[in-house]
Amino acid sequence: MKIVPLLKAIGFLFLLVLIPTLAVIRLEWDAILPIIIYLQLLLIWAQAEIGLRQHFLFTAQFKPFFDIRSQHIASTPSSEGIWIRNVSRNPAYNIMIGRLLDERNEPIDPGQWKDKVPSNFIGSLAPNGEELLCCLDEEMAHSEFAIELSYFDQLGELGTVYMKARKEGSFLLIPQTKEPPGIFLNTFEYFALFFRFLSFKRHFKR
């Protein structure tokens, strides 16, 4: 478990409890009505975040998924072709390579890799479609780096996929992760995850 998100969740929960506590200390019995209004505002806030969460989950079903394979190009034996395949039922648009990252995930200057990794701009990729994405020269084909691939889904939202290259020539596909919207829901979900983690940890200590 990461400490920083946990501290943020604790701080947010502390603020939620602090407001009605200060109201009771200052107003005593007169704080009942303000606390009721405060709880109603929290309920409205939670309902708004539930709506945002539903929209987030709805748009997730339109995201495309890809597969990568490499193959030697017959016309240039020293080059390795990287083919991208849409394995989902959703089309993808404007697929292109945005950046190359080194072993430390630092961006590589385009002047250092543009000639070594010539790439194609793919206007659209239908479900089960496959296109040549780029070519790697002999040096790049045996080095470790990551390709940042950008695309647009059918709703017009920008997506990113990272292709991690290994020295043996294989690739790992790492989709970009997005935190679901909502401070209120994410805080309580993180606490639920934290308590499940503690329960899981106690279970394996037995």
Image (cartoon, helix red, strand yellow):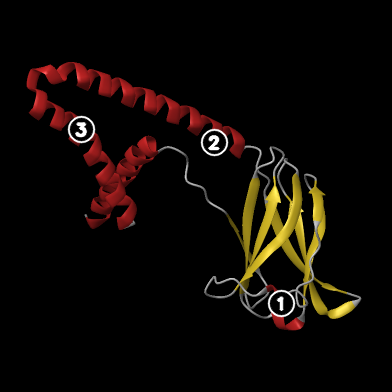
Element carrying mark 1: helix
* Structural distance between the alpha carbons of marks 2 and 3: 30 Å
Residue at the right extreme? 75
Q: Nearer the viewer, residue 31 or 48?
A: 31
**Mark whose residue sits in front, 2 or 1:** 1
**Tag 2: Cα neighbours inside 10 Å, few (<14), some, or many (≥20)?**
some
Q: Which x, y percent locates residue 126?
A: 80, 45
From this view, report whether residue 3 is shown above or below residue 75: above
Report if residue 165 is visible in the image.
no
SS at badge 2: helix
Q: Residue at x 55, y 35 (%)?
A: 57
Residue at image mark 2: 56
The quarter of the image holding the C terminus is bottom left
Rendered image quadrant of residue 62? top right
Residue 187: give x, y in percent of width and height.
Answer: 34, 41
- Name the mark on residue 19: 3
Tag 3, which secondary structure?
helix
At label 3, the amino acid type is Ile
Q: How would you rate the neighbour count of disc 1 (Cα within 10 Å): few for under 14, some for 14-19, many for 20 or more?
A: few
Q: Which mark is residue 111?
A: 1
The kind of residue tagged 1 is: Gly
* Residue 110 shows in this picture: yes
Upstream in sequence: badge 2 or badge 1 = 2
For the point 34% across and 57% down, which residue is it?
2
State whether residue 181 is above or below residue 172: above
Lower sequence index among marks 2 and 3: 3
Measuring 89% from the left and 75% from the top, which residue is drawn there? 74
